[in-house]
Amino acid sequence: MKNNHTLPLIKHHQANDALVLDQNKVITATQLINLAQQLAKKLPTQKKAINLCQNRLAFLVTFCAVLIRNQTNILPPNRLPNALNRLFSETKEIYYITDDKTLELELPCFFIALKDLILAPNSAFNIPQIKAEHLACILYTSGSTGTPQPQAKTWQNLVDNAQAMAQHLEQPKPLNLVATVPPQHMFGLETSILLPLQQGYCIHNSQPFFPDDIKTALDACPEPKALISTPIHIQHCLDTDLNLKKLTFVLSATAPLALNTALTTEQQWQTPLFEIYGCSEVGAIAHRRLTQSEYWTLSPEISINDQIEPCLLTSSKLAITIKMPDRVRLTDLGQLVLLGRTASLVNIGGKRSSIEELNDYLQQVEGVMDGTYYLPLDNTRLSAFVVCKTKTKQQIIQALKGQIDPLFLPRSLYFIESLPRNEVGKITQKAMQALFLSHSK
């Protein structure tokens, strides 16, 4: 029997509520629907659309238009033409949508220009209904532990993700958000697209990268407002002594924060800093406020078996069980402790550590602005890459000697201008392999 159950595209918004802040303009819930419906009528007939829009409003309008047209949004792991052409070389029922005229792929293209869509002055607030089981999007894992893997999401899945994220935040609405993360990433999709659509929040159109741009975007938002970001962006803001006051909260994800970063953020910005732990397969899994507890509180629908390795995670809403990429343990109260990535476990001379633990020590060395350990595929020697202007190799090694077992000192230490981090601050396994090969010849 066919399931005809539907769910609204927009929820918890009234007709004239602000949904997007676009420079000096406000895009209301009614206007967003109007723009999406106009675009939906113009889209090609293929069933899948690669949403490559960089402007967040363009992405949001496109995302909604694709759903209204009963198509599927494809959210790739990056925008590199060669990678995209390879990824979709065998798929015929697909095209890509972009707001960048310079992007050229070996696929049918649809160029979106929001200025060509004219807002109807008195359009009715008729919220489109989307089939709950419609394949709303396919996004990809980050590639930090291997090749990016596709993750299919129904509209029901995404609505549940938005609700779970809102429950983690437990924040009053309305609330204006500024996000440094791209909407093609799971964390960015949940916070900057799904929360505005499904939970009554409002998102600023920008995707600021530099600290001054982050401040400019936040200054343009009325209170209450919050910053959605990553550890790398937050640290950059702290390094420049950015004064970000009057925030309701800061939310971070993609990697665990260092305690010192969390303490400094809350002290300087006078606001609570929350973290989300999640994965592309499930979405938000747990949350914490590190200045109050190192433990993570799990979502009610999540259960974890930590008695086997790899640990197994079960989501009752998704009705799936997955192998966790991280090593974890549960406390007696059912809270989560992260022990590091399974793939980053280092075993040398019978002693064990993890890349994450070693990175913490490396990044705490005075003068090191950024750094990471790397264990080559042959698993024979540890190397490290650092961004540092004030220390020599010997000084960094000497500083590490007082913190870690000599077995885990890097046998090779390379100075570089910057690490190959992506838009959310992660470094893919492929990027690290290329970096190591380029320096170890």
Image: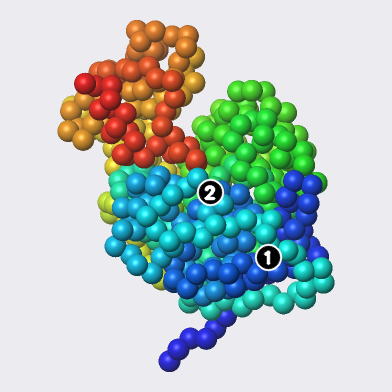
Residue 35: which numbered mark, if any?
1
Task: Identify the residue shown where x is 48% and y is 37%.
Answer: 425
Please indicate whether residue 352 sits to the left or right of residue 117 in the image. Answer: left
Q: Residue at x 43, y 61 (%)?
A: 108
Q: Quadrant of residue 196?
A: bottom right
- Left of 262 or right of it: where is 25? right
What residue is disc 2 on?
101
Question: Alpha carbon of mark 2 to alpha carbon of mark 1: how far?
Answer: 20 Å
Tell me: residue 238, above or below residue 11.
above
Residue 198 visible from this viewpoint: no
Q: Nearer the viewer, residue 140 or 121?
A: 121
Is residue 158 something one can see in this rendering? yes
The amino acid at mark 2 is Lys
* Farthest residue, direction bottom: 1
Q: Nearer the viewer, residue 98 or 128?
A: 98
Q: Position of residue 83 (x, y in %)?
A: 35, 48
